[in-house]
């Protein structure tokens, strides 16, 4: 059902965006007339409600966006018209045996789940790893980011990346997409060469099948521009654990030699490193996938800043400390990095994905984060450039670098070969932030380093940068896919045209 | 008439500071999760908020009635997180009136339905 909460001021989770809304609407799985019986009923009610809402938006010439967990730092998720809260659509289930396409491998069928758009990473982890019903397998997500509060659909739509060095980013575990875009029926999108479900399933979810690899790969990372994704079919893995040894401190030559050696990272499941740009060394965080074993202690959750008595830094303390005069940026970075290593790094632990990646912390207010990806071959040059810029501008920051296998999403920013190296840094959201971002991008461009920007963290994608990041063919594929799914209906497409899409020249 | 100008100015500044600047924030939230894993906050809704004005050292209270934590069919949801904010204006109001007027802003997010 749809509940309209009326006009209000809205902020995203990390308080980087504030805006007025004409209406904030909750969509949920309740039904005042009858009790919904099967999981297909839930999918059908949600897709019916949302498709009707999109048609209403078309008639009233309103913009409409689904917010998921409102986790994105950039304004890519928001609109000043109708914002739709999808978090209450959090069902997850297994498709019946008679719903699979004959070509979908038998051994993968018990590992496939259908997840509604509002389910969060943490909720899905619990569903998969702690099965309640007898006979249901314990399974794991194939990768996640460090955070667990995002909705799975939101995380995929913005290309949340994680650090699965030999698997890929979150979009890479999606097998099929249910999309509502205001056309006559919801759409169920699959790759043409990897069919998943059959006509029985399409009938049960009252959706029109679309089997097209270009459209599928375009819709995967489409940040709400293709309509509202109401469900995913997600491929999971049998329950596993990841072992993280104690973090290793290495210098730049050692880091360079490790990253240049595919033999080094071919046996790892998770690979990241962190550093203080005012210092010379790096700390490697290496995870190896192992079989699940009972009896290991549950890892201490990371990113918890309050102590046992509940004392924690106030919401604005971080900003205050980082703005302190008479203390150098290098000194502030040193303190910040020490706390980061203590509270935010996986070291000497073993656990499942759902035990390890649990962060739902909201950023301390006044912070923002940037993420960009480069090729593994450009890592050292990028790090040197970033360090120099940080020191030149005297900024107190901590940098995290995560290595991800490249994926197939047309606008997936983790698209670099042989591996994508995602460089992230959080910093104060003040007048230095846009200057620093521009400085880094200008230096990358000047050094001939190809980069791509994280859709959910950066708002700097203009037509020139889009072309540099993805090239003409990908841009045209994405635009054509969007046109096709909307049947060329410009009014419907306009409902989902937002500021960032226009800035990028995509609308 | 002159003495009224500073009072009016103080009042306007108080109103502005009550509206825009947060001074102290207390978060109330659930911790832990199934099988010992930390779930953090899993809100089902966006923040809702209301103002509370307590008078005469608590002799007159101002309850915050949360009516938004429910589904479309009226089913009630739990409350996942509460935030109590006292900005500079609220602190000053309490100080200048010697506690006769103690305003604060109460915000909440509702929990998700159990899957």
Image (cartoon, rainbow, N blue to C red):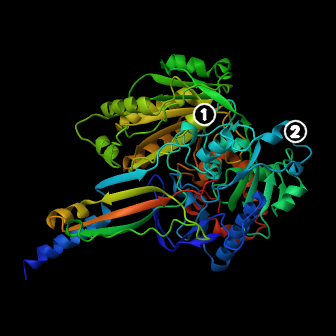
Give the x, y percent position of residue A334: 35, 29
Residue B37 seen in the figure: yes
Q: Closest to the observer: A423 or A138? A: A138
From the image, which quarter does the C terminus of chain A lie in?
Answer: bottom right
Task: Give the residue displayed 57% in from the left and 33% down from the top.
Answer: A402
Q: For mark 1, give the secondary structure.
A: loop
Q: Which mark is residue A163?
A: 1
Give the x, y percent position of residue A410: 71, 47
Instruction: Give the quarter of the image for residue B77.
Output: bottom right
Instruction: Give the quarter of the image for residue B56.
Output: bottom left
Classify residue A189 as left or right of residue A414: right
Classify residue A94 as left or right of residue A326: right
Task: Give the residue displayed 69% in from the left and 33% down from the top.
Answer: A239
Residue bearing the label numbered 2: A106
Tally of numbered discs: 2
The numbered mark, 2 or 1, whose residue comes first in the sequence reads 2
Classify residue B13 as left or right of residue A298: left
Please check whether the numbered discs 2 and 1 fall on a single chain.
Answer: yes
From the image, which quarter does the N terminus of chain A lie in?
Answer: bottom right
């Amino acid at each position: 059902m749809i509940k309209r909460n009326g006009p209000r001021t809205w902020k995203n989770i990390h308080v980087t965006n504030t805006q007025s809304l004409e209406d904030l609407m909750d969509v949920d799985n309740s039904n005042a007339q009858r009790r919904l019986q099967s999981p297909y009923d839930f999918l059908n009610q949600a897709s019916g409600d949302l498709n009707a809402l999109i048609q209403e938006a078309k008639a009233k010439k309103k913009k409409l966006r689904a917010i998921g967990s409102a986790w994105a730092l950039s304004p890519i998720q928001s609109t000043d018209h109708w914002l739709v809260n999808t978090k209450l659509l959090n069902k997850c289930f297994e498709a019946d045996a008679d719903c699979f396409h004959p070509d979908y491998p038998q051994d993968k069928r018990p590992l496939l789940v259908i997840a509604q758009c509002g389910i969060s990473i943490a909720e899905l982890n619990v569903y998969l790893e702690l099965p309640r019903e007898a006979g249901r397998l314990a399974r794991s997500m194939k990768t996640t980011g460090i955070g667990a509060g995002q909705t799975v659909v939101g995380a995929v739509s913005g290309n949340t990346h994680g650090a699965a060095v030999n698997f890929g980013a979150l979009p890479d575990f999606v097998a099929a997409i249910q999309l509502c875009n205001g056309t006559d029926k919801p759409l169920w999108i699959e790759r043409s060469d990897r069919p998943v479900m059959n006509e029985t399933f399409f009938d049960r979810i009252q959706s029109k099948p679309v089997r097209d690899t270009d459209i599928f790969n375009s819709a995967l990372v489409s940040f709400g521009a293709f309509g509202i994704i109401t469900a995913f079919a997600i491929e999971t893995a049998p329950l596993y654990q990841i072992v993280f040894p104690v973090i290793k401190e290495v210098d730049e030559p050692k880091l360079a030699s490790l990253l240049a050696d595919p033999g080094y990272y071919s046996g790892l499941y998770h690979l990241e490193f962190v550093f203080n740009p005012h210092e010379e060394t790096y700390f490697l965080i290496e995870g190896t996938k192992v079989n699940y074993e009972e009896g290991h202690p549950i890892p201490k959750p990371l990113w918890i800043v309050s102590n046992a008595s509940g004392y924690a830094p106030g919401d604005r303390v971080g900003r205050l400390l980082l703005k302190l005069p008479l203390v150098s940026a290098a000194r502030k970075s040193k303190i910040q990095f020490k706390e980061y290593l203590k509270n935010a790094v996986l070291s000497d632990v073993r656990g499942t994905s759902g035990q390890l990646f649990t962060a739902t912390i909201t950023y301390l207010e006044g912070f923002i984060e940037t993420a960009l990806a480069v090729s593994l071959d450009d890592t050292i040059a990028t790090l040197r450039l970033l360090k120099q810029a940080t020191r030149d501008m005297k900024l107190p920051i901590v940098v995290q670098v995560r290595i991800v296998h490249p994926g197939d999403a047309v606008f997936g920013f983790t698209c670099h070969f042989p591996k994508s190296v995602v460089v992230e840094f959080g910093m104060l959201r003040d007048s230095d932030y846009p200057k620093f971002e521009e400085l880094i991008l200008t230096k990358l461009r000047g050094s001939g380093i190809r980069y791509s920007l994280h859709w959910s963290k950066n708002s700097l994608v203009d037509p020139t940068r889009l072309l540099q990041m993805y090239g003409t063919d990908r841009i045209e594929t994405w635009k054509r896919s969007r046109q096709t799914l909307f049947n060329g209906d410009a009014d419907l497409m306009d409902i989902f045209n937002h500021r960032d899409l226009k800035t990028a020249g995509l609308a | 008439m002159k003495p009224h100008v500073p009072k009016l100015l103080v009042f306007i500044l108080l109103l502005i500071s009550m509206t825009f600047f947060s001074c102290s924030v207390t978060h109330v939230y659930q911790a832990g999760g199934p099988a010992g894993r930390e779930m953090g906050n899993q809100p089902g809704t966006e923040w809702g908020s209301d103002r509370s004005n307590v008078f005469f050292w608590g002799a007159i209270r101002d309850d915050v009635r949360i009516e938004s934590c429910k589904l479309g069919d009226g089913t009630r949801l739990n409350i996942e997180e509460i935030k109590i904010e006292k900005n500079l204006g609220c602190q000053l109001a309490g100080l200048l009136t010697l506690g006769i007027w103690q305003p604060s802003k109460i915000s909440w997010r509702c929990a998700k339905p159990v899957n």
